Image (cartoon, helix red, strand yellow):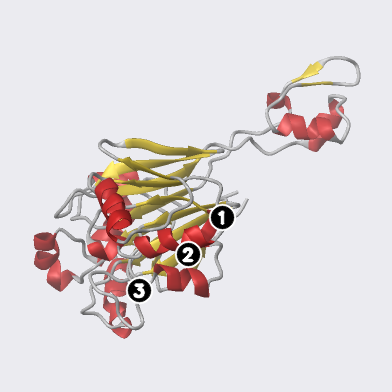
Amino acid sequence: MNLEAFILGCGGMMPLPYRHLTSVLLRREGDLFLFDGGEGTQVSLRKLNLRWKKINAIFVSHTHADHVTGLPGLLMLSSQVDRDDPLYIYGPPKIAEYIETSRRVLDMYINYQIVVKEITEPGICYEGDGFHVRAFPLQHTKTCVGYTLEEHERPGAFNPDRARELGVPCGPLWSRLQSGEPVEAADGREVRPSEVLGKARKGRKFSYVTDSKYLPSIAGEVAGSDLLVCEGMFENALADTAAEKKHMTAAQAATIARDGKAKKLALIHYSPRYTDSELKTLLAEAKTVFPETVLSRDRMVFPIEYVD
């Protein structure tokens, strides 16, 4: 089952000609999840030829303009296509007011159901087939949350030789065993999945963190992430500015990745003071703390693979 993260925009504060505002799309087979939607979101969706009309849910970190101004256009455009399923929008308090006010003031024509759910405490906010999305608190100049999408454990590897030894012929019975269902062998004996499957295997984990001051607690929330997308807005020389504005340096993002034992860190939400060529300073400082760090760029794609 494919799991991919698409960086639709990696900039913070203001859009630049070469850098849209922060937005990430996560695709898990037929499910699409949008994390924030700054200016330029629709442009990147179009350039990447993504089926944006199939977005299941939108997860908003907070209601600062650089994270939500791309949403009204996306909501209106979705009325121009056939959409039968509801669109779920999650975010901290004020997200419902923002969506409702936008709909009213812009006189939006909406021909599908929009379900807005405000997050008031940490915990699972969305559940799907074999995975869930969890929200956790960040600390910014207004209420802000981070998100993790985590898959449930998968059955262990199937041992076909053992299945044959137990009298289970190749075919549909093997599939039932792999899905956790006991079957009847040729001699009438019940064969349980535990007899032919190895140890349960870990699912994949994606984490999204922006905007926030550095908090050691974030490492626990994103622990074990296969991909952590985390803001790294400033260089070390501007650590005081980052603290004042309740943002992070790239090195602080790397500290979270290191302490949370993430497999890969993708920096995002850069200050507009840095040109693309100057971002190498952020990357170098982060890599001294966590070598598996990369700079995200608009329309970059990160496949998230199973470990085994």
Q: Which of 135 and 231 is in front in this view?
A: 135
Residue 169 placed where, x, y %?
Answer: 88, 31
Q: Left of 3 or right of it: where is 259?
A: left
Residue at image coords 30%, 50%: 100
Q: Which of 59 and 305 is in front in this view?
A: 59
Spatial distance from mark 3 to mark 1, Cα to Cα? 27 Å
Observer able to see residue 194: yes
Instruction: Assign a secondary structure to mark 3.
Output: loop
Identify the residue position indicated by label 1 in the image.
305
Kind of residue indicated by mark 2: Phe
Residue 108, quarter of picture: bottom left
Is the residue 215 above or below the residue 166 in the image?
A: below
Compare marks 3 and 2 and give the one earlier in the sequence: 2
Compare marks 3 and 1 and give the one earlier in the sequence: 3
Identify the residue position indicated by label 2 in the image.
6
Is the residue 165 above or below the residue 212 in the image?
A: above
Kind of residue indicated by mark 3: His
Instruction: Assign a secondary structure to mark 2.
Output: strand
Q: Which of 279 and 137 is in front in this view?
A: 137
Instruction: Assign a secondary structure to mark 1.
Output: loop
Identify the residue position indicated by label 3 in the image.
20
Labelled disc at residue 274? none
Q: Nearer the viewer, residue 240 or 42?
A: 42
Compare marks 2 and 1 and give the one earlier in the sequence: 2
Foreground mark, 2 or 1, reads 2
Q: How many residues crowd mark 1 within 10 Å: few (<14), some (14–19), many (20+)?
A: some
Mark 2 and mark 1 residues within 8 Å of each other at the beta carbon = no
Kind of residue indicated by mark 1: Glu
Q: How many residues crowd mark 3 within 10 Å: few (<14), some (14–19), many (20+)?
A: many
